[in-house]
Amino acid sequence: PTRGSGVVWSDFADALYVARSKLFVEGPGAAAADAAALLARATRRFSDAFECLPAMVSTYFTLARALVLQGRLRRALASLQMGFIFVRDRGFSECTPWPVQGWDMMLAGRMLTERVRALDDESVL
């Protein structure tokens, strides 16, 4: 099923699962690169990304997770904040093949914000 963007979301889901698995096989750098490439493809025309909200939430979350593992906390937080744009209906989809729910994003954003603030406080002292 495609719409205006030409993205076949079922193929996108397959590619996202491959990107997520690269974290364990090739490391966080490969996972981040694949997730970023998927985001570039889905947001070529940003409005088209709204065709499949759970896909976008899951992809931004995947990128953020890989960035955290690389120690790039502020970039990870920025990725989560971008992903929040796509969280709708309190972030819960009862039946979805996508690996991330809205509460995953909310909790990750909260925890990462606390960590970044602690790092900022340390640097001020």
Image (cartoon, rainbow, N blue to C red):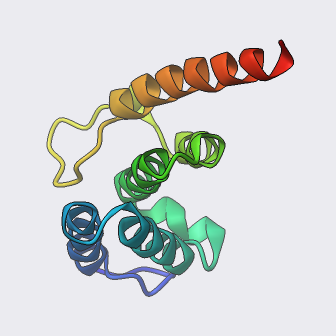
Front residue of 53 and 4: 53
Say which residue appears at 54% left-offset and 39% top-offset: 84
**Going by the image, does 107 lie left or right of 101?**
right
Q: Position of residue 95 (x, y in %)?
A: 14, 43
Say which residue appears at 75% left-offset and 23% top-offset: 120
**Going by the image, does 91 lie left or right of 50?**
left
- Quadrant containing the N terminus is bottom left
Q: Position of residue 79 (x, y in %)?
A: 57, 49
Say which residue appears at 48% left-offset and 52% top-offset: 70
Say which residue appears at 29% left-offset and 43% top-offset: 100
Front residue of 31 and 61: 31
| Residue positioned most to the bottom | 6
Height in image: 77 above or below 63?
above
Q: Position of residue 82 (x, y in %)?
A: 61, 48
- Quadrant containing the C terminus is top right
Q: Position of residue 31 (x, y in %)?
A: 36, 67
Q: Quadrant of residue 104?
A: top left
Front residue of 22 and 125: 125
| Residue positioned most to the right | 124
Total number of numbered discs in the rendering: 0
Height in image: 118 above or below 13?
above
Q: Quadrant of residue 45?
A: bottom right
